[in-house]
């Protein structure tokens, strides 16, 4: 019995669901590729719903013969969300695979999806790739293709973690029961219905996985420039609808892009919010100029122009849904609430505030503890000033008073970085996603450090110097740990099992300058990782990890100089 048989048992395992509209021949191509799957045809079915095409799709494909169960239904035009919802309702499989009708797939596509479904809470997002004719696509489609390729690369490398707001219906699968639990598609969303479903899947307890080997290849729509610009406009409009429906999900706010936008582009986007009709004329002129640049071989500049045009159209849609420039400005100012929360020292149940203050105080206590332990420059007078009850687990540790905390916050760069990290986490816990992004970018620019907001630093972590840190979203650092500058705690595969993950540092681990730790490893309590080490295997408690001594040799003597000759 195979692993899949053990996992899914008897009967129909998979239902492939797709919406289709005026694409009978592209759908024919995909249905034939599904007939070539390595998964036994008795284990899957295909349900395609014609969303009111001009030509009856079922009639157009009446001559197609396939080995699996195929259902082609038809409905009046109601949008992709309604069509996919009906497709799921007509299906019978345990796992629902949703793809677009213009995709191409390899024979192993369905098996690759099934292989990642380890439990009944997993949503699997597959890779979207542009076809080999990328260079022949219109400029605006190349912009989209390159954007999706970058997203896939980030998921595959572990640089980004798949979340609900990342879901796209070009290549996704989920258990039927989880789809039903989340409530299915919201047919009111004529765009971004996939992201909106993904948000509710996450709220329903879904765990997300990325299958880099479950690939759908997307060719050109060969749509018009005008339709592409209209789609960008509706993206902004429906993104705002989504944010209003889920105000507790800052990752789906249209304002989340602002901190990442090139400062040169921001005045144009502000113009699109203030004067959307005039901005439409500007967008048309800009995309025509970008197309001219593309034709003369300046593709990078042309892509940048297309990016600007998309942003103008997107924020025109945002303005339409918010109802006016004042409301748009009001929503954008939301991130500033974080500053007032910090000053007031409270929010709702105050849990996030207590976590922030407690974390900073504990970080500072450990700074003073290690100063007493290691730094003979700390004089007796300062020790007396900071005297207090011992820190739990460290006999003789000094607590540190408010004066020394303030002074260390000014003097110690590593402590500044930890304060910024804790403020970033506070903003996120308070539901202020834009403010959290602002703090994340501040940390990158001020400290040249990239600490993901999902990385877990227990209270009582000490950073020395603080420049050049690279900390994965999956990394965990326990109380009493010390990280020196240029340390990496990266996401990577286990060398034996190939399972992905990031390091867990148990209590009181010290990681030296320039050390690189990656993969799902555990570094045992009170271990010291010396400077420059590269480590991808777990280490037992109370170990010392050192690099081999560098080989030092004598340089060859230089040859005799030749006099003259200029």
Image (cartoon, rainbow, N blue to C red):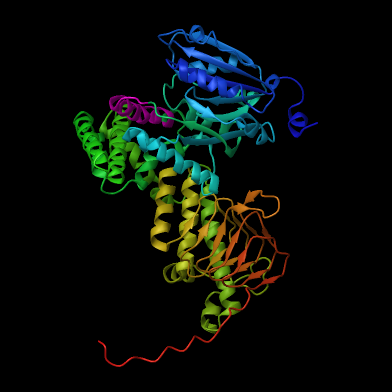
- The percent coordinates of residue 146 (x first, y second) are 40, 40
Residue 135, x across and y down, in percent:
37, 38
Front-most of 225 and 271? 225
Q: Visible in this render: residue 254?
A: no
On screen, residue 318 above or below 490 = above
Is 203 covered by the magenta stretch?
Answer: no
The N terminus: image quadrant: top right
Majority secondary structure of magenta residues: helix
Whether residue 506 sits left or right of residue 463 in the image: it is right
Q: Find out whether residue 232 is within the magenta segment.
A: yes
| In-front residue for pair 461/403 | 461
Q: How many marks?
A: 0
First to last magenta residue range: 222-243
Residue 502 against residue 274 in the figure, above or below: below
Which residue is found at the position 39% from the left and 49% from the top?
Answer: 340
- Quarter holding the C terminus? bottom left
In front of the other: 414 or 383: 414
- Image location of residue 100, percent across then percent down: 49, 24
Q: Quadrant of residue 537?
A: bottom right
Coordinates of residue 141 in the picture (x, y in percent): 36, 33
Residue pictured at 68% horizontal, 31% vertical:
120
From this viewpoint, is residue 339 visible? yes
* Residue in the foreground of this view, choosing between 212 and 278: 212
Q: Residue furthest right?
A: 1
């Amino acid at each position: 019995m195979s692993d899949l048989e053990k996992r899914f048992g008897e009967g129909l395992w998979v239902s492939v669901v797709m919406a289709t509209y005026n694409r009978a021949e592209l759908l024919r191509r995909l249905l034939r590729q599904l007939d070539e799957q390595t998964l036994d045809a008795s284990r899957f079915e295909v349900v395609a719903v014609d969303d009111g095409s001009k030509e009856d799709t079922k009639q157009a494909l009446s001559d197609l013969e396939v080995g699996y169960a195929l259902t082609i239904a038809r409905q009046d035009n109601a949008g992709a969300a309604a069509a996919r919802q009906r497709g799921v309702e007509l299906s019978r499989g345990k796992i629902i695979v949703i793809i677009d009708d213009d995709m191409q797939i390899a024979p192993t596509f369905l098996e690759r999806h099934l292989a990642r479904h380890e439990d009944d809470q997993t949503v699997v997002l597959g890779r979207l790739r542009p076809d080999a004719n990328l260079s022949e696509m219109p400029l605006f489609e190349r912009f989209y293709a390159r954007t999706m390729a970058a997203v896939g690369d980030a998921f595959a490398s572990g640089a980004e973690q798949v979340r609900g707001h990342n879901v796209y219906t070009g290549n996704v699968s989920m258990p039927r029961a989880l789809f039903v639990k989340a409530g299915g598609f919201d047919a009111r969303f004529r765009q971004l219905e996939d992201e909106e479903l993904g948000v509710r899947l996450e709220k329903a307890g879904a765990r997300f996985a990325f299958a880099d080997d479950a690939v759908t290849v997307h060719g050109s729509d060969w749509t018009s420039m005008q339709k592409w610009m209209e789609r960008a406009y509706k993206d902004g409009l429906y993104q705002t609808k989504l944010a209003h429906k889920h105000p507790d999900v800052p990752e789906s706010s249209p304002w989340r892009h602002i901190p990442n936008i090139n400062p040169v582009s921001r005045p144009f986007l502000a113009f699109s919010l203030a004067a959307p009709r005039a901005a439409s004329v500007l967008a048309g002129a800009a995309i025509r100029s970008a197309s001219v640049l593309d034709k003369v071989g300046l593709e990078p500049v042309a892509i940048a122009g297309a990016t600007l045009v998309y942003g103008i159209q997107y924020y025109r849609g945002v303005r339409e849904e918010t109802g006016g420039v004042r409301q748009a400005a009001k929503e954008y100012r939301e991130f500033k609430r974080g500053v007032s929360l910090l000053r007031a020292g409270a929010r709702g149940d105050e849990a996030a505030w207590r976590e922030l203050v407690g974390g900073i105080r504990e970080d500072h206590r450990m700074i003073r503890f290690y100063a007493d332990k290691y730094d003979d420059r700390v004089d007796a007078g300062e020790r007396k000033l900071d005297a207090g009850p011992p820190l739990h687990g460290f006999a003789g540790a000094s607590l540190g008073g408010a004066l020394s905390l303030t002074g260390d916050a000014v003097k110690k760069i590593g402590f500044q970085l930890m304060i910024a990290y804790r403020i970033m986490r506070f903003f996120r816990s308070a539901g202020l996603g834009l403010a959290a992004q602002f703090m994340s970018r501040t940390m990158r620019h001020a400290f040249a450090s990239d600490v993901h907001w999902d990385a877990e630093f227990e209270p009582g972590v000490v950073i020395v110097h603080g420049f050049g840190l690279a900390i994965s979203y999956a990394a965990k650092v326990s109380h009493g740990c010390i990280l020196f500058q240029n340390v990496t705690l990266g996401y990577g595969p286990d060398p034996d099992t190939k399972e992905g993950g990031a390091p867990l540092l148990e209590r009181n681990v010290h990681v030296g300058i320039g050390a690189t730790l990656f993969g799902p490893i555990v570094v045992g309590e009170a271990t010291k990782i010396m400077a420059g080490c590269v480590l991808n295997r777990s280490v037992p408690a109370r170990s010392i990890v050192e690099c081999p001594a560098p080989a030092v040799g004598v340089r060859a003597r230089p040859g005799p100089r030749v006099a003259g000759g200029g």
